[in-house]
Amino acid sequence: MSELPHIRVQDLSYRYDPEATPALLNVNLDIPRGQFVAVLGHNGSGKSTLAKLLNGLFQPTSGSVLVSGMDTNDDDKIWDIRRTAGMVFQNPDNQLVATQVYDDVAFGLENIGVPTEEMPSRIEEALKLTGMSELKDRAPHLLSGGQKQRVAIAGILAMQPEALILDEATAMLDPQGRKEVLQTVLRLNREHGITVVWITHFMEEAAAAERVLVMDHGAVVMDGAPKEIFSQVDKLRSLKLDVPPMTGLAHLMIKKGIKIDPHVLTVDDLVREVKRLCPSCLKD
Ligand SMILES: Nc1ncnc2c1ncn2[C@@H]1O[C@H](COP(=O)(O)OP(=O)(O)O)[C@@H](O)[C@H]1O
Ligand SMILES: [Mg+2]
């Protein structure tokens, strides 16, 4: 028997109302367990709608979504699915409810009826995984944006999810906060095998993913490794998307006739190319 992917989306369509154009139309998508997938797309392309369908907050208008083999069309499974595929939203302030970090993480566990004696170890572990242990007695509203998002993530981790779906979780953060949250989630993915769906409009974040999906008008129009996706600069721009800064720079240089690799994503990639093209340009 072949094993199901962690998340399987089949012929998925979604309409907010029967008259409206569908927000998603015939999306097919398999996400293997443990993959880190970034989702890009300009405003209104369907990213948030997809996110909410992936964890059963919405049910399909037609088609299906299977999470760990559970169908979101099955009302009896919805609660398990939401716990299995935890969702992190854009605004950290809307996700925190308690007056202390520790209690905030506990809140979700109380809601799902975890036995009291099991709670402390789960909470401590979640705080540790997000690097928030030392701040567990703090008031959430006094934390930085990045710290608040890490508390929100801790609250979900305490429920022992198998997947995290983050819908522009870094959009309201400063560069330091964005980095903290991305590093935290990358670590959860690499060290704990948690499947990640990372929706973002920051190209450099998508460059850190294993796979990038690009959405447009409710469909997945590009799907591949970051280097494959970002080397298609003109196509991305036609979808109203930018490319990572170093990729943009490399493509400007290509247009000027410099024979640089179009797959450059990072500063290190660019430095490697400069070294290759001009060995004498760099100090040893
Ligand atoms: N609550 C809603 N009611 C009606 N239409 C909506 C609602 N939310 C989103 N839409 C529409 O669905 C489409 C996809 O939106 P969304 O999934 O929010 O895109 P994205 O997250 O990529 O910006 C857009 O056309 C948007 O206007
Ligand atoms: Mg959105």
Image: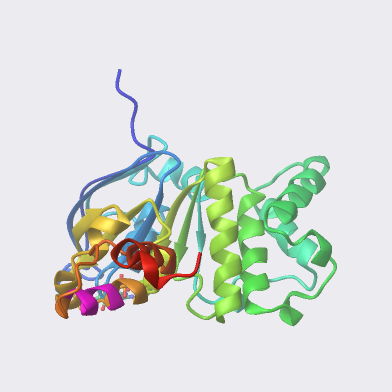
Vertical position of residue 116 compared to residue 48: above or below: above
Residue 157, percent across and down?
A: 63, 51
Vertical position of residue 281 compared to residue 210: above or below: below
Dominant SS in magenta: helix
- Does the rendering let one see residue 25? yes
Residue 202, percent across and down?
A: 40, 73
Colouring method of the image:
rainbow
In the displayed orientation, state which residue is furthest to the top.
Answer: 1
In the displayed orientation, state which residue is furthest to the front.
Answer: 280
State the image quarter where residue 76 is shown: top left
Residue 90, percent across and down?
A: 49, 74
Q: Is residue 11 left or right of residue 75?
A: left
Q: Residue 2: say if magenta.
A: no
Task: Identify the residue at horizontal 43%, vertical 64% (top origin).
Answer: 268
State the image quarter where residue 121 is shown: top right
State the image quarter where residue 33 is shown: top left
Give whichever of 203, 220 is nearer the camera. 203
Give whichever of 194, 162 is nearer the camera. 194
What segment carries the magenta color? 249-254
Residue 173, percent across and down?
A: 55, 79
Q: Quadrant of the N terminus?
A: top left
Task: Identify the residue at horizontal 27%, vertical 73% (top origin).
Answer: 250
Counting labels gives 0
